[in-house]
Amino acid sequence: MGAQKGRDLLLKIDATGTASFQTVAGLRSHTISFNAETVDVSHQESAGQWRELLAGAGLKSSSIRGSGIFKDAASDATIRSYFFNGTIRAWQVIVPDFGTIEGPFQIASLEMGGRHDGEVTFELALESAGELTFTAL
């Protein structure tokens, strides 16, 4: 993947549960990470006493972090209600020239801040809450 404009990475949510995704915020910075735990199956007779791992056995997870401004009052209200109610919804992350990651996430952290001479900003952390799919572009 070549160089890309950061603003082209989109974060969308299925707010109605009907697989109709909409952008909920103007993110100014964002990251997505994928993790896979390992399962150690080493034993006394492991070749050369090297660690052995069991392929495909560990738990997978993903985290998304972003900061920016809310698109509108409705987006602000949706995100706040999902956080306070612990709602799990389908989200999409669209990475230009790479693909789309889609699946259930829960808002793990929501922070708001602002300066006296600026807009209200937020920071959001999402944690995967089920199987994710990847569709290459």
Image (cartoon, grey):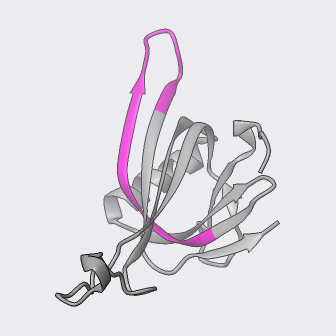
**For this view, does 33 lie left or right of residue 48?**
right
Q: Is residue 108 magenta?
A: yes
Residue 16 figure quarter = bottom right
Instruction: Locate residue 119, reporting x and y percent.
Output: 53, 22
Q: Is residue 91 magenta?
A: no
Residue at 82% across / 66% down in the picture?
137
Residue 87 against residue 125 in the figure, above or below: below
Q: Nearer the viewer, residue 78 or 112?
A: 112
For residue 86, above or below residue 3: below
Classify residue 6 by image quadrant: top right
Please give the count of numbered marks on the rendered protein.
0
Image coordinates of residue 34 in percent, x first then y, are 49, 63
28, above or below 14, in the image? above
Part of the protein shown in magenta: 102-121
Seen from the viewer's position, the closer of residues 107 and 70 is 107
Q: In the drawing, does residue 5 fall left or right of residue 39?
A: right
Residue name at image x 56 percent, y 42 percent: 30
Q: Position of residue 79 (x, y in %)?
A: 48, 53
Dominant secondary-structure state across the stretch colored magenta: strand
Query: Residue visible at 47% across and 67% down?
Result: 105
Give whichever of 21, 63 is nearer the camera. 63
Say left or right for 93 vs 41. Answer: right
What residue is at 77 percent from the left and 40 percent from the top?
Answer: 4
Expressed as whole percent of the image width and height from the top left, the position of residue 58 reads 37, 81
